[in-house]
Structures are given as C-alpha cells and as structure tokens.
Amino acid sequence: MRVRFTSTAEVELKEAMEFYQSAREGLGAEFLAEVQAAINLIESFPLAWSPLSSRTRRCRTHRFPYGLFYQVRSDEILIVSVMDLRRDPKRWEEYL
C-alpha cells in the first residue's frame, strides 16, 4: 500500500528534523530513520495500532517523543501529522 504525507505532515516532519539536527549533528538523520522505521511498520501492519477514531490511528516512534497520525484508505495510507506528543494533547483531536 502506498504511503502519502499531507502537506501539513511534510512540514511537521521537516521542522522536527531541523530541530534535532540543530541540537546535535546527525540527530536529524537519526530522527528521520526512526520515522522511516515507524512508516515501515505501518506499511506492514496498518491496523496494528488502536484507532483513535473511526478513521485515524497513531503509531509512536520509539526513541523520540513523536507520533505518526495516519488514516488507512482503500488505496493508500495517509500520514496526516507527525506530531510532538509532548505538546498540547488537544491539538491531535483535529485529526480525529
């Protein structure tokens, strides 16, 4: 199944990668590798994570405090947000 990011999710991913890269050389690449590992799991087991609503699920990264909020559609997996889970928890409710 094809994985696609919304424009919002792409911006969030880029900003998070840049934040980690500015904190320590190479940490941005480590963050991207962690996100890619989560995407690989989602591709292999799209229904493995409990639904947050009838259409949205969340897969947490292991090393970083981020979650990938995604929707399983008939022909694709849509990543709607790459969110720092330490932020306002109400923020993710807009993706439900």
Image (cartoon, rainbow, N blue to C red):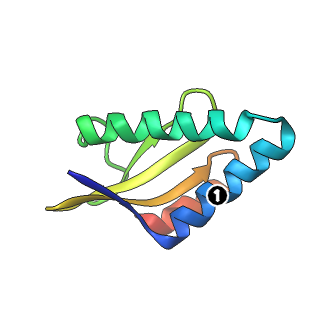
Tell me if residue 65 can be seen. no
Q: Residue furthest right?
A: 23
From this view, report whether residue 29 is shown above or below residue 8. Answer: above
Q: Residue furthest top?
A: 63
Q: Residue furthest bottom?
A: 7
Relative horizontal placement of residue 30, taking residue 70 as reference (left or right): right
Hey, which quadrant is residue 2 in on the image?
bottom left
Q: Position of residue 72 (x, y in %)?
A: 25, 56
Relative horizontal placement of residue 43, taking residue 79 as reference (left or right): left
Q: Residue at x 52, y 45 (%)?
A: 67
Q: In front here: 84 or 76?
A: 76
Badge 1 crowding class, 10 Å Cα cut-off, few under 14, some 14 to 19, many 20 or more, is some
From this view, report whether residue 84 is shown above or below residue 59. Answer: below
Q: Quadrant of the C terminus?
A: bottom left
Tell me if residue 77 can be seen. yes
Q: Position of residue 29 (x, y in %)?
A: 65, 38
Q: Position of residue 53 (x, y in %)?
A: 33, 57
From this view, report whether residue 58 is shown above or below residue 62. Answer: below
Q: Residue at x 73, y 34 (%)?
A: 27
Q: In front here: 45 or 36?
A: 36
Element type where label 1 sits in the image: helix
Q: Residue at x 61, y 66 (%)?
A: 11
**Residue denoted by label 1:** 14
Q: Residue at x 35, y 36 (%)?
A: 40
- The type of residue carrying mark 1 is Lys
Number of numbered discs overlaid on the protein picture: 1
